[in-house]
Image (tube, rainbow, N blue to C red):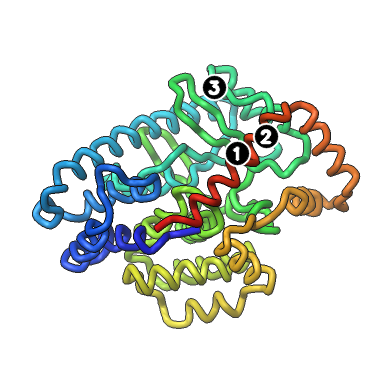
Amino acid sequence: AGPSPSELELLRAAVLPPSRAEAAWWRWRASHDPDTPNAFAAALLPAVATHLDADRLGADAALLRRLRRSAWVDVEFKLQMLDAAHDALTAAAIEPIVVKGAAVVTREEPRRGARTFDDVDIVVDADRLPEACDALEAVGWTTSDEFRARVGTGSGLHAIPYTSPDGLPVDVHRWVLFPRFSPVPDSAWFERAETFVWNGRRMRRLQVADEVVLAIVHGILTVSRSSARWPLDVVALTRGQDDACWDAIVRSASEARVARVVGAGLALCARELDVELPDGTLDRLSAAATRSERLRLVAARRGAPVSGKFVAYSRVRRANGQIPNPFAYAAIRWRRLRRRRFADIVGKRWAKARTRLVDSRRP
């Protein structure tokens, strides 16, 4: 999980006051080339280009302007996919909730292109996930047979990755934190989601407090570009918020049993990025944290998986009022393995191991 020390320099360059941001930029620039960044740095450079003017960026200003324009175009195409997915689902009387990167961008329209994201994430009612899949496939969206076969099986699958007819990715979730990161279903988050208007469409997104918790947990407990850019979301979402919002953040993290991780994330943002926390916020989060949360954070920092597949399966069963059955779980896993080639299984395992290795070597 991140951000790494070099990524922190880019984050400082993207959010701190101009003189301190410029100093952070040149510290990063002394040992890195913005023309050949790794995937994590590339996710942050558009935000730096948005925040610092050309005089402070020096000879790199033209390059960073091009990166910002490229990011803006990419974001615009993906937001069109958000509109298309929303239209397909609402035509089937399914109201999706926009989460993660796309949801943050809808709050920061003047800065579009500063916050990049890999795919559009939307949530539908867990009971209506099969209908949502049918609605998207009816208008040309596609997913793999492996994922489609798992819909409605009671597995711990929390999202289906779809590809639009134009080749852009949209993940259709039934949960966001549960069951991988939290033992508590996300239903309360979805029930209190707020309504907003986007491109003439009435949409829903998580409340600010819930989106902050999601950004921190997903960023710290995963190995993806989110692990570098989640502090940007915390800074953007909490800017100008009152004590009521901070109380809601503490309450949301405590309810989801991720208070320890959220506390660690907010402490980093306060220490490194000048995010102002009300007095007692970190103490309240620490007091609400359980022992299992502390162990999960330690495991994530050491690159270990935050939860196994059987843990996710057990949480889903308990949420449905059922007792986890190891034999039933083994049968589910066996059916899945029989549908897959041995080479695919080994390849997927190797890809995960390689990702963790790359993450452990981030500068």
Q: What element carries label 2?
A: helix
Type of amino acid at the residue the image marks with label 2: Arg
How many angstroms separate mark 3 from mark 1 (CA)? Answer: 16 Å
Picture residue at 18% right of the left edge, 62% below the top: 22
The nearer-to-camera label among 3 and 1 is 3
Q: Position of residue 130 (x, y in %)?
A: 68, 29
In the image, is residue 126 above or below residue 13?
A: above
Q: Position of residue 100 (x, y in %)?
A: 47, 48
10 Å crowding of disc 3: few (<14), some (14-19), many (20+): many
Identify the residue under disc 1: 124
Q: Where is residue 87 in the image (x, y as percent from the top left)?
A: 48, 27
The nearer-to-camera label among 2 and 3 is 3
Q: What element carries label 1?
A: loop
Picture residue at 60% right of the left edge, 39% below the top: 124
In the image, is residue 341 above or below residue 289?
A: above
Please tell me which of labels 3 and 1 falls first in the chain: 1
In the image, is residue 157 above or below residue 44?
A: above
Q: Nearer the viewer, residue 187 or 263?
A: 263
Type of amino acid at the residue the image marks with label 3: Trp
10 Å crowding of disc 1: few (<14), some (14-19), many (20+): many
